[in-house]
Amino acid sequence: MIAATIPDLAVFFVGAAIIVVGALGVILAKNPVHAALSLVMTLFGIAVLFIEEQANFLAAVQIIVYAGAIVVLFLFVIMFLGVDKAEDITTEPIVGQRPIAAIVVAALMASIVALGQLGHWMVGTHASTTATTGNDVADLGRSVFTTYLFAFEATAALLVIAVVGAVVLARRVSPDELSTDEPEVAQVPEDLGATMTAGEVEQ
Amino acid sequence: MSVNPSWFLILSALLFSIGAFGLLIRRNVLVMFMCVELMLNAANLSFVTFSRMLGDIGGQATVFFVLVVAAAEVVVGLGLVVAIFRRRHHAVVDDLSSMKG
Amino acid sequence: MLHAAYLIIAFPLLGSLLLMTFGRRLGEPVAGWLGTAAITASFVVAVVVFFGVLHAHQTDCIPGLLCQGSPIAPGSLLNDQFVQHLFNWVNVGGFHANVDLLVDPLSITMCLFITGISAMIHLYSIAYMHGEEDFTKFFIYLNLFVTSMLILVLGGNLLLTFIGWEGVGVCSYWLVSYYFQKDSAASAGKKAFIYNRVGDVGFLLAIFILYSQLHTVSYVEIFQRAGHLSPLWATMAVLALVLAASGKSAQIPLFNWLPDAMEGPTPVSALIHAATMVTAGVYLLCRLHGVVNLSSTGQGVICGVGLATAFVAATVATSQSDIKKGLAFSTVSQIGFMVLAVGTKNYEAAIFLMVAHAFFKALLFLGSGSVIHALDGEQEMVRMGGLRKVLPWTFGTFMIGWLAIAGVPPFAGFFAKGSVLDGVFAKSPVLWALALLTALLTAYYMSRLFYLTFTGEERFTAVGPNGEPGIEHPHESPWHMRFPLVVLAILSAAGGAIDLPWVHTWGLDTFLNPVFLTTTPAATNSGSTQLFLAIADAVVAVAGIGLAWVLWRGKAARPELTPAFLKRVWFWDDAYDAVIGRPATALSKAAAIVDDEVIDGAVLGTATLVRRGADQLRKAQDGYVRTYALSIAAGMAAFLIYLVTRVFS
Amino acid sequence: MTNHTFPYLDVLVLLPLFGAALVAIAARTSDQIARSIALAVSLLELVVAVLLLVHFKTGSGAFQFTSHHSYASALGITWNLGIDGISLFLVQLTALLIPIVLLGTSVKAKGGAYAAWMLVLEAATIMSFVALDLMVFFVAFELTLIPSYFLIAGYGHERRAFAAVKFFIMTFLGSAFLLIGIIYLGIVHQHQTGGPLTFALGALAHTHLSSGTAIVVSLAFLAAFAVKAPLFPLHTWSPDAYREAPAGASMVLSAVLAKLGTYGIIRFNLTLFPHASKTLAPLVLTLAVIGIIYGATVACAQKDMKRLVAYSSLAQVGFIALGTFAFTSQGLTGAVVMMLNHGLITAAFFLVIGWIYERRGTWQVGELKGLQGPAPILAAVFTIIMLASIGLPGLNGFVGEFLVLLGTFLSHRWWAVVATTGVVIAEMYLLWAYQQAFHGKAEGANATTADLTVAERLIVAPLLILIVVLGVYPNLVIARITPSVARELAPIVQTTTGVYHRAMHSIAISGRPSGSDLDAGVIGAGEVQR
């Protein structure tokens, strides 16, 4: 592999810094609006790294779809619902959640890195039909409309379903539906379980 | 010409971990969704990296689909948030424990 | 003529089917006459077949029947044996049991007296059962009974006999519990059935043993192959047969159902529980004489069972106050004599006593039925007495029956019992002495019964001990009841003629000889011994009668002579109840509790454990999405750590 | 091999399913119409079944009327049906019982759905009896649970929910083992042949398993079947289920569904694991004998008629298992005959008990008294059924019981001797119950109990006629069963030495040979050589 040039390295480290800082911003910002803005930062950093990796099309899509659409949607919902109050992140109601989370996440991180760096991965021959030619847009377009056609069609269906789902979920609720705030307890026939345990025998 | 792919993978792992940690400690539903996005992006980064390593466009195609799925997920997720908020006037996950066993 | 053999069975079967279908419309008394006609027809056929057997030459081969020298079963049949094949029944693997009738002197002798006496009793029942609600049903059962009994005796293999064996058992059950609204009758029927069923286990085991050793259940083939039986298996088979016989023929240890069975209508007692069904066990042993002959241990057991039963039942009979129970124990005792005869390999004598006993015991029961009928159902002898004048026909015929059973010459019982005792003497004088003692008791208890019923004061006019109203004008029975009495009385008086000891050219002995192929033990006794034995028998009979006259003349009750020990049948039922009945009931209750608590408890306990475990696991589902997320993350971490260890090991 | 143009078996399986769909649709408008349609369908099914019986070739032990279609070949599952002497009469019995159930029993509400479930049950049961592919069998075997569950839980008595769940969970747990066993066997077979995955019975019969493995796998099969049958000590679902189920469901459950267990043992355990079955024989025989004595003893203490019949079934099933594992032609024939006869008898029992319940609202023996007075026909019918159950010769119950005991005596003498005593106990509880309920003086409500109506007499008549006819002339059944039994036994007896020589002897006499029948009988097994 050709050694990396200085500009490449610079781009990578700058991008990496943007990503990490943005990510930390997401999880540490008290205000959801700030978190969303930090997310934009991360997404932007990732787009930068995509370009670094010759995934130009994806970089563009990343900016348009993620930063342009998804984060805007986030911000819209935050504003719409008025939940832009600061959250108190200094306390944690669930006992042990944070330390355990820290340990688990550290373990995850460590094992991923260990596996990635130290394992001797066998890499088989890949499918030649989807080999890159250098023109990533053409390659991507060709593979999406040939090899992954069914998956592509399925995403269309998925999006339609998601839209319908969102419409149903976000529609105006009638007052009597609102009144049943507490969901009903499912009516499990009580004697099913109870009698099985009781061990009593009818004579 | 290229940066060592391992660095990308380490960065991806780091980003994933941050996202996961955020998901585990934050209580605001919206922020949790953002953390999920972070994790998805970490995965995307890996896919693109592998795509480059193997010279196979399949990785990028997968990212493409992940984007679609992420979009759908956000749409439905935010729809859920709106619906919950209408009933409860807040969006704190720890209060949503009616599925307790 | 022999082809008609199947008709012997067909007529009563047809009768019962017709009665089942049209009986209710026919009603009383036509249904009774129909039933009687069916049995009479059967009797006529039996007579025809009898002459066929009598005249069929041993080399005769009649088309359609298997016989000696026939190519189908070469050499397998004895002289005068004929097999009528009706249809295939159960054929599995090497097991063949077909519906074949075996017609030979033994089975036709049985058929003759069964159908004959049945016809008489059917006729008698028309009057006796007059006015009963289930009049038709009675005759259905009775015809079915005769059908089963005839299947039993004509069956050509063990399995077919077993059908009849069970058939008579179930008919007995129905008839004993005929007055089903009486709890005692219902219980008695059940008891009879269950005791019989215990005997059936013996029958089944006998079938299994014989089939597993000889690979056949057909009598003809069993006779032919009996030589292949090892002594041990022969003994096992005989023991199983003894169990079977003791169930059906009311022998020790299964004899105590018979007295209870007297709850049935009196004609039933006469037919089933005196003349026919209860002798089936003896018939079975005689039928399988080829097997019995092989086991001297088995014969010893048979002798023991027979003699013990005869003696015990005779002692018990001395203390009964119910006329029918007295007769019932007498029946048990007499069958004991028959079994004793079988044990001494004196099969002809057993059959002779069976026939003679059928005559006089049926007569006695019918006579007692006549008495009971006259006294509106009273069975206690305490409330009888002096019926001599009131019921002259009954008195006269009953007296003949009494003298016959007591063994007074020249009535049938004298010869029959004499030929049994001859055989016993030839085997062992000690046994003979005990048997003679029993004969003395027989004469004694029968005389007691007779005196209590017919002589002395007319106690029935007085108010009974339990406040029953006195019976003013008892009346003699109608002719349909008297006619059978007379016929049976004649047979009881002259029945001995069928097998006179000094006649060796014709008679039952000669007739049956081709079947049993044995020399009568009696024949081994010298002439003077025979004379001595005959005199001893007669003396004992007269002595018994005299003893009873001295002790019971003009008396109604003598508690000192009827101790509770004898009244309660040597406490036999109580012993069974204590040793078997109550523990079994307790066991079954315990088993039910075990089933509920232990076995089902294990099942439900497992369910409870699962539920308890689930209750604990449920706590993990705390409802917080972040906890779930943490679990997922932890799971993933665990999985990755596992991978790491795999990769680096 | 018989190839009839008319696909009897497919029709027998599918007709009730379509009928059920039709009934379910009709039930939306009227229960009455729905039940009429159901009755018509079930009668049509009966006609098809009788035609099948007429065209069945007596004397052949092979599978007949085979039907073979690929279904999910990638999974190795083929629609593979066939019928032989062992399954023939179980199919007939099922086809006969459903119309009787539909005519003779009624439910308070939702009669249309009841009838539809009955038809589904019929289809599933018949499918199980004729399936020659283990997966198809398994699916059908499980499919029976669904209608049974709804029939018990939806139409039963006080503790129906409990009984239904207990029944479902216990049988389902057993089936889980069966599924594992089937899959294991299929995969091992595929590995051995290197061919495609298959679950065809004929092919799998040639799988070579080490003796230890064979025992474990056959125990997995046995677990499912023993629960279903039910064999001691896995029986405790049955008293509850039989008692709480509505009369019709009790009939089908005890008469036909439970036979799936014993049938499964004969069809699958014996065919697939001849050696292992032999090794396990002493265990199963002992359990069977315990079941006979124990079932009868517990029955003696029951005060509830339905529970009494349930425990009596336990004893009867013990006899069936005894005959099966005796490995003699008499024993196995007896077991098959007994499956049919016990089906007829318990069905009749539950039918009549159901009628008593309709009249008196109770099954408690203690509350009934003297019914023979007001209802003599009812008493007569009950008596005949009772006597058949006791095993009275001349009625159908005897033949099977006798052959089972005889067959067992030939190979396992002491088990047979002990089992024979069970015959006596069986009689005690039935006579006791009969005396309590029918004898004595009827008072109060008992005195006014109505006798059987003409319709009811006609409904029970087919059962009674069969009880008598099969007792008097059992050859009707036996002649069709023995060739298949000989085929089934051949691999077991061939590998047997020593104490089994008598069994061999009886096979030799019967003249029915060899395992080659099996190959010839099963389509698709032909290419696999032993």
Image (cartoon, rainbow, N blue to C red):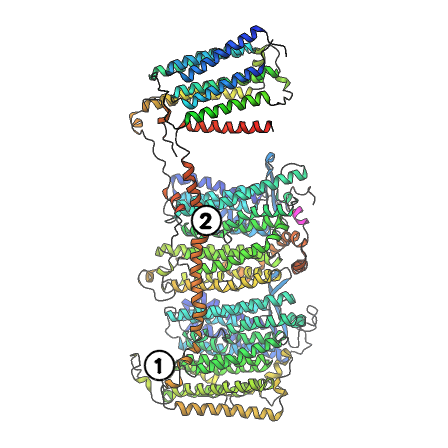
For disc 1, the chain is C
Q: Give neighbour class at mark 1: few <14, some 14-19, many 20+ (Cα, 10 Å).
A: many
Magenta highlight range: D515-520
Task: Say which residue label 1 marks.
Answer: C375
Q: Position of residue D185 (x, y in %)?
A: 61, 42
Query: Do labels 1 and 2 touch, CB within 8 Å?
Result: no
Amino acid type for the residue under numbered disc 1: Leu
What residue appears at the point 36 percent right and 63 percent down from the top-left corner? D369
Question: Which corner quadrant holds the N terminus of chain C?
Answer: bottom right
**Left or right of C412 in this view: D485:** right
In the image, is residue C220 part of the stretch drawn in magenta? no
Q: CA distance from mark 1 to mark 2?
A: 63 Å
Question: Which corner quadrant holds the C terminus of chain C?
Answer: top right
Under circle 2, the secondary element is helix
Of tags 1 and 2, the one toward the viewer is 2
Q: Position of residue C415 (x, y in %)?
A: 54, 87
Mark identifier at residue C603: 2
Residue C286 appears in the picture as rendered: yes
